[in-house]
Image (cartoon, helix red, strand yellow):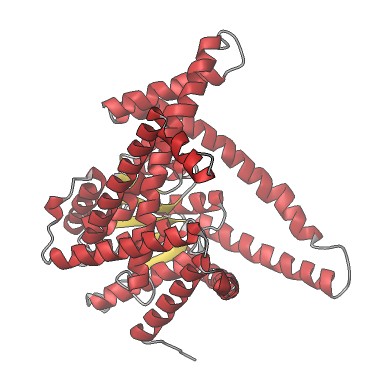
Amino acid sequence: MNIKLNAPVSTAIAIGVGLIVLAGYFIPSITNIRFALLRTGLVLAAVALLVGIINLLTVHFKKMGADNENSGYSLILVIALLLTLVIGIIDMVQSYLLGQPNFQMTNWIFTYIQLPIETSLLAVTAVSLTYAAASILRKRMDLFSITFFFVILLVLLGSFSIPPATLPFLHVIRDWIVRVPALGGARGLLLGIALGTITTGIRILMGTDRPYGG
Amino acid sequence: MSATGFTGIVVIVLFLGLMIFFSIINQEPKIKNIRSIPAYNKINQEINVAVEDGTQLHISLGRGGIIGPESASALAGLSILKQVIEKSSVCDYPPVASTGNAIISILAQDTIQGTSKAISVADKGRNPSGELVGVTPFSYAAGTLTTIRDNNVSANIYTGWFGSEIIWLTTAGERQSTPTIAGTAQLPAQAVIYASASNPLIGEELFAGGAYLGAGKIHLASISAQDIFRWIITFIILGSVLLKFLGIDTFINNILAGSM
């Protein structure tokens, strides 16, 4: 079955729902409607995840078939996804129909495969961040980059707890940087982001930006 | 209605009024009247390179959804995606989009297909794609790396909601010697982007993409509305500092408390 809403209908629904949710933030009497709409949105998000997984499988099946140097990775991804899915279904049957302990095998996968991999990737991220900070002056030698580099250096030195970086004045400088310029700069950026967020939202509510229906 | 709620409505109505006002008075707005942002100049330049070299652009929309504080960056990213597709309509290869969120992946596909159809390139046998590459921060980053390493990708544009995993994407782009244009609304990731991307978008610059890529006069009007509000906020902050410095804030507080 192919259901396709015309652009004006989908636009009207999107704008109407958007306005009600927005009004729900300011008018207490319609807060319940806002929560009901948001709950519906969460259900739709879960359905979207299923669609996204099907999309992921489709894309990687295509990559496996094509003359692609990364086809091996796609094969591993598809096998891992299908294996996890099968194990998840078996776990679900065992838990709900046979009354056995909840999702033992799925928990094992997360604890012994997913968690160690993500933790090791986090460790690599720390190294990459240090490398990026160190190489910024090679990339852009301007006043802002020099300031950025030396501020990072000062904050790092001020954070160390091993000699000789435990000098009291370094801690004072670090605290001052974190409390005054960094906090002020962060607030300035957040104000700008808030203004940008408001205009983006208003454009969506006006229907001038329509990420739905093209 | 609470005072905060009333203030919120006033701000939104004022914004709406200013945007409509500026879009009416500037019937033929010009992009050259707004300050230059190098990252958007680079996007325009890279679109031209992609057209000439027969390469494609990669746009990564982050892993933010549409429910929550990250939605605005994701929607701003979609707006940039739409403009890039329109501008690169004569490319041999359409842009490829990757996301770490299922809803944004559907919206990205919808944007690609809808925009391609609108500019009549959907029937050229092109197969534009918007793919969900992973739903956790690191699976998203790892999944996007294969697209970045594609030899046919001539530039990477990261616009959306990212965490510190963005470092993987920016450094991978730099290692491929492809220009990296990146922007996000999350502050720690902005610092990472500033250090690692060749063309960073700072703060609200992410939300100005439509105006700089020719999305229409309402985008330019929203830039003007933001400028007005920026001035108002600046005056409020400076005024508050002055009142505090002169001790008038205590005087006002006393009046409000009824102790005078």
| Residue B216 appears in the picture as rendered | no
Is B203 positioned to the left or the right of A60 in the image? Answer: left
- Residue B140, compared with residue A46, is above or below; it is above
Which residue is most to the bottom?
A1
User: Residue B180: horizontal and vertical position, in percent?
Assistant: 32, 45
Residue at 31% of width from left, 39% of height from top?
B198
| Closer to the camera in the image, A60 or B120 | B120
Is residue B102 shown left or right of residue B39? right
Identified at 19% across, 50% down, the residue is B45
Q: Image quadrant of residue A47?
A: bottom right
Q: Position of residue B230 (x, y in %)?
A: 30, 47
The total of numbered circles placed on residues is 0
Q: Position of residue B123 (x, y in %)?
A: 26, 79
Q: Is residue A139 above or below residue B25?
A: above
Residue B23, percent from left and from top = 19, 65
Q: Quadrant of the C terminus of chain A?
A: bottom left
Q: Is residue A199 above or below residue B234?
A: below
Residue depicted at x 18% and y 46%: B35
Q: Residue furthest front?
A: B260
Residue nearer the viewer, B209 or A83: B209
Q: Can residue A126 be seen in this snapshot?
A: yes
Q: Is residue A48 above or below residue B51?
A: below
Residue under the image location 35 percent in, 43 percent down? B236
| Residue B219 left/right relative to A46 | left
Task: Decide if residue B216 is on the left or right side of residue A146.
Answer: left
